[in-house]
Amino acid sequence: MKYIFLTILHNMKFNVTLNKGFELSPGTRIKNGLEVKDEILKTELMSWTAGVHSVDEFENTVYYYKRGDFPHLKNQDEMDKKRNSVHFLFSKRSTGICYRPLVYKG
């Protein structure tokens, strides 16, 4: 089952727009550009599940996203059973990034 995890990195700012962002590992990036954020958030599904107000919170922010696949999860029911533990794991990983210094040399 394919997934996308997306979260705001609060208290992190870049002075320039980084359209490609920083690749942390394959499928995982820190960005502040619009294209990926809009591709993920500006959908009917996200407006319905997250709500328009939550989607709008991503405006003018630095965000972390991870795309991947859980090959062992075959359907939505299996994903629903694992959702909280997966969310916790990805949230902790993104939080750890905020405490490591990142230097952009562009």
Image (spheres, grey):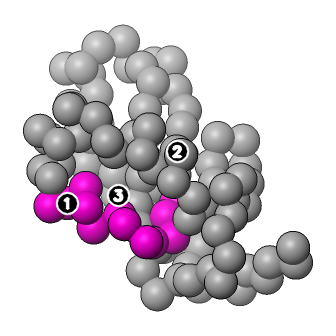
**Residue highlighted by disc 1:** 54
Q: Is residue 76 among the parts visible in the rendering?
A: yes
**Residue highlighted by disc 2:** 36
Q: Could you tell which of marks 3 and 1 lies nearer the N-terminus?
A: 1
Q: Is residue 83 above or below residue 57?
A: above
Residue stretch rendered in magenta on the structure: 53-64
Q: Where, by quadrant of the figure, is residue 72 drawn?
A: top left
Q: Disc 1 on helix, strand or loop?
A: helix
Which residue is pictured at 20% across the width and 32% down the height? 44
Q: Is residue 11 above or below residue 54?
A: below
Q: Residue 23 placed where, x, y %?
A: 73, 54
**Residue highlighted by disc 3:** 88
Q: In the shown orientation, is residue 69 left or right of residue 28?
A: left
Identity of the amino acid at label 1? Ser
Q: Residue 48 placed where, x, y %?
A: 11, 38
The alpha-carbon separation of the residues under discs 2 and 3 comes to 22 Å
Residue 56 is inside the magenta segment: yes
The alpha-carbon separation of the residues under discs 3 and 1 comes to 19 Å
The alpha-carbon separation of the residues under discs 2 and 1 comes to 16 Å
Q: Is residue 23 above or below residue 32?
A: above
Q: Residue 59 placed where, x, y %?
A: 37, 66
Q: In the shown orientation, is residue 16 left or right of residue 58?
A: right
